[in-house]
Amino acid sequence: MHRSVTVVLVALVLLGTAGAAHAQADARTVAVGCRAASAPQSQAVLFDLGICVGTVAGAAAHLAKVHQFFETRFPNVEYPIRDKATRDAYVGTTLTIDPNVCLPAGLTVAALAAVVDRYSAAHPDRVAGARFPFTVSALADAYGCGPNRH
């Protein structure tokens, strides 16, 4: 117990000094942290793990709110959307805020981290970008609402 508390306190001190240097953590940082978070035997660097967990949890919470908005704005929508006006409004909303993502109930942060890890392995060219859009893209790729999904 004492060792765990010491490790956490040291990590917090290090995060305080490293935080400024990593304030603009990118998608690569998220990918590294998510790889560590999805591997239970890993002794992850606490900062990368924290960036992953924070980014993934934040993106999932954000996308849940976006999904609620879509459900309110477009109730009972069926895919493919055949009505042109509805389809145009739906696409415009997706481009303006974020995609409609249907996250299954009961997902854990570790499961979401594994999704981001697989996405980063499948799309290494996208890892150099900003962390939040990268994470949203990974979750949208796995759980996007639409035909044959939901």
Image (cartoon, helix red, strand yellow):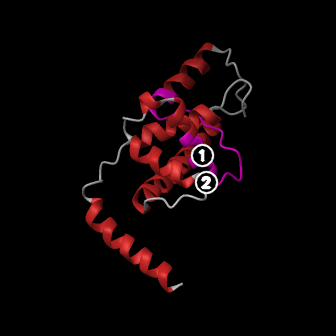
Which residue does the numbered mark 1 point to in the structure image? 114
Range of residues picked out in magenta: 93-117
Instruction: Indicate yes or no whether the magenta region holds residue 118.
Output: no
> What residue is drawn where x is 46% and y is 81%?
5
Q: CA distance from mark 1 to mark 2?
A: 6 Å
The quarter in which the C terminus is drawn is top right
Relative to residue 75, is residue 116 depicted above or below?
Answer: below
Classify mark 1: helix, strand or loop. helix
Relative to residue 2, is residue 34 depicted above or below?
Answer: above
Q: Position of residue 80 (x, y in %)?
A: 69, 18
The quarter in which the N terminus is drawn is bottom right
> What residue is drawn where x is 49% and y is 41%?
135
Q: Is residue 86 left or right of residue 10?
A: right
Which residue does the numbered mark 2 point to in the structure image? 110
Where on the picture, by quarter, is residue 141?
Answer: top right
Do residues under tags 1 and 2 come within 8 Å of each other at their CB atoms?
yes
